Image: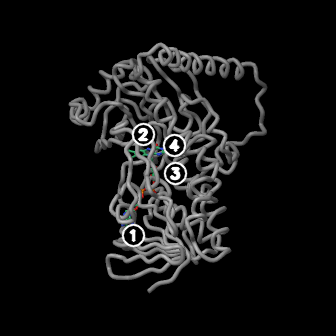
């Protein structure tokens, strides 16, 4: 039997971040995951925007981890084949497996990693008991359940999931390469849908190493034949759906695999239990279109590891009353509510035909157009300032940590861009 304070089940974004934070805080913990090296997984491929980077900074890991990512400092915003704005934006492209690898590299003693699968969990208000597939047993004061979408262990613990929106959106990931030119003219770009009938909110193009990665989102049903056509003839299908995109990209090709992944929105029920806390996707998912899944993960883990766990360990026992403090944490609940409301408002502003949402769509278009126009005007009349160096502009630690995005416009897709 191995004894520890905290047993973390699942070494994805949430579990690995928790282990790295607890190790730095000197809290004994064991992270258990069946993969020594996280395998390829089509999930978040970029982090960006002041709020999201601020949340990452609050874990203490951003600066070292983002050294493995590809930085871009400007994102073009476009629609109807027209460049609306060149937004200054700190954005980091990184594939999910590389992100998890970089976070796991930050795990140090007294946190340790065990490559195994948890097959059984028994919880109580005192100590928790985990059984691993290879037969080892772990005794811990608290279990952090960070096993993502897997349902087996949750069911064993009497936790169910309630789907709030089936196939809320579908994410499509692929690489694009310019034809007849060495590079695309933009550092990164978000191109919004031209017509609501295409059921596409936007496509985002961003560099990851030498590659230009594309994340395209759609609100089509999972059975829609359009998805098969997209997989077989990606360039033609994309050109038909976003006919004026080429005005900005020039001719392009699609290289490598095309990953297509539907996402359900769900929340957990029956999770308020002694000795156990759920974080990240294990607690609730959000829509990838919003780009707020990592906001939720970083908020959950930062609040848990820097506020709640140190307080819980300071006294005997791990009753449900202690655990409730995490689920009722106002920073966590505000982030969850903001992310969830964005999932629905983003869908409506992209495809809804009602007059309110048509007006919202045009307001957003005119907002970006006006911002871009003002930015160009200001840059023409501004005196160049030497004070802001490239390094300062691109350092993630220069982002402010705040929960202010909960109050930002419900339709402004800040993290997603
Ligand atoms: C297609 C897609 C695109 C997305 N794009 C974005 C984006 O652009 N921006 C954004 O912010 N968010 C995005 N998200 C959301 C984001 O990816 C997730 O919110 C986040 O990755 C969740 O991390 P997690 O650690 O909770 O789960 P995971 O990363 O899934 O980790 C779960 C871990 O648990 C382990 N595990 C499972 N069962 C066991 C067991 N029995 N024992 C031990 N270990 C176990 C698994 O091996 C895995 O390592 C996207 C999601 C999807 C699906």
- Residue in view at x 52 percent, y 47 percent: 70
Asked whether mark 4 lies closer than 8 Å to ligand 1, one says yes
> Residue 128, how many percent across, how many down?
48, 76
- Residue in view at x 58 percent, y 34 percent: 74
Give the residue at mark 3: 69
Q: Earlier in the sequence, mark 3 or mark 4?
A: 3
Which mark, residue 292? 4
**Looking at this view, is 124 or 242 the one in front?**
124
Q: Secondary structure at mark 2?
A: strand
Give the residue at mark 2: 212
Q: Secondary structure at mark 3?
A: loop
> Residue 346, how many percent across, how many down?
47, 30
Find ligand 1 in the image and state its quadrant. bottom left
Structural distance between the alpha carbons of marks 1 and 3: 21 Å
Give the residue at mark 1: 36
**Looking at this view, is 128 or 258 the one in front?**
128
């Amino acid at each position: 039997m191995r004894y520890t304070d905290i047993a973390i089940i699942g070494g994805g974004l949430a579990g690995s971040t928790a282990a790295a934070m607890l190790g730095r805080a000197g809290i004994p913990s064991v992270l258990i995951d069946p993969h020594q090296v996280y395998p390829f997984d089509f999930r978040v491929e970029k982090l960006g925007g002041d709020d999201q980077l601020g949340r990452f900074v609050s874990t203490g890991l951003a600066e070292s981890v983002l050294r493995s990512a590809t930085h871009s400092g400007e994102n073009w915003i476009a629609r109807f084949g027209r460049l609306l704005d060149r937004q200054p934006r700190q954005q980091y492209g990184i594939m999910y497996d590389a992100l998890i690898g970089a976070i796991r590299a930050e795990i140090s003693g007294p946190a340790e990693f065990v490559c195994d699968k948890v097959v059984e969990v028994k919880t109580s208000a005192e100590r928790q008991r985990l059984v691993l597939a290879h037969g080892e047993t772990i005794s811990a004061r608290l279990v952090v359940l960070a096993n993502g979408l897997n349902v087996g262990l949750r069911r064993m613990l009497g936790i169910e999931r309630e789907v709030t929106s089936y196939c809320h959106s579908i994410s499509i990931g692929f690489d694009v390469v310019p034809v007849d030119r060495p590079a695309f003219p933009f550092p990164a770009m978000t191109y919004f849908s031209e017509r609501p009938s295409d059921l596409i909110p936007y496509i985002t193009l961003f560099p990851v190493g030498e590659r230009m990665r594309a994340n395209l989102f759609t609100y089509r049903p999972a059975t829609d034949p359009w998805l098969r056509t997209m997989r077989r003839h990606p360039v033609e299908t994309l050109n038909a759906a976003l006919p004026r995109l080429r005005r900005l990209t020039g001719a392009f090709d699609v290289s490598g695999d095309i990953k297509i992944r539907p996402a359900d929105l769900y929340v957990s029920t029956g999770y308020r239990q002694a000795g156990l806390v759920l974080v990240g996707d294990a607690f609730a998912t959000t829509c990838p279109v919003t780009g707020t899944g990592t906001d939720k993960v970083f908020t959950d883990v930062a609040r848990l590891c820097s506020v709640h766990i140190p307080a819980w360990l300071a006294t005997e026992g791990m009753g449900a009353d202690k655990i409730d403090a995490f689920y009722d944490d106002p920073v966590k609940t505000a982030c969850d509510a903001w992310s969830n409301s964005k999932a629905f408002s983003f869908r409506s502003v992209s495809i809804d035909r009602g007059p309110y949402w048509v007006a919202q769509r045009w307001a957003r278009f005119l907002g970006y157009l006006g911002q871009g126009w003002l930015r160009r005007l200001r840059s023409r009349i501004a005196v160049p300032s030497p004070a802001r160096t490239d390094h300062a502009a691109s350092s993630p630690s220069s982002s402010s940590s705040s929960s202010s995005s909960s109050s930002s416009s419900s339709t402004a897709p800040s993290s997603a861009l």
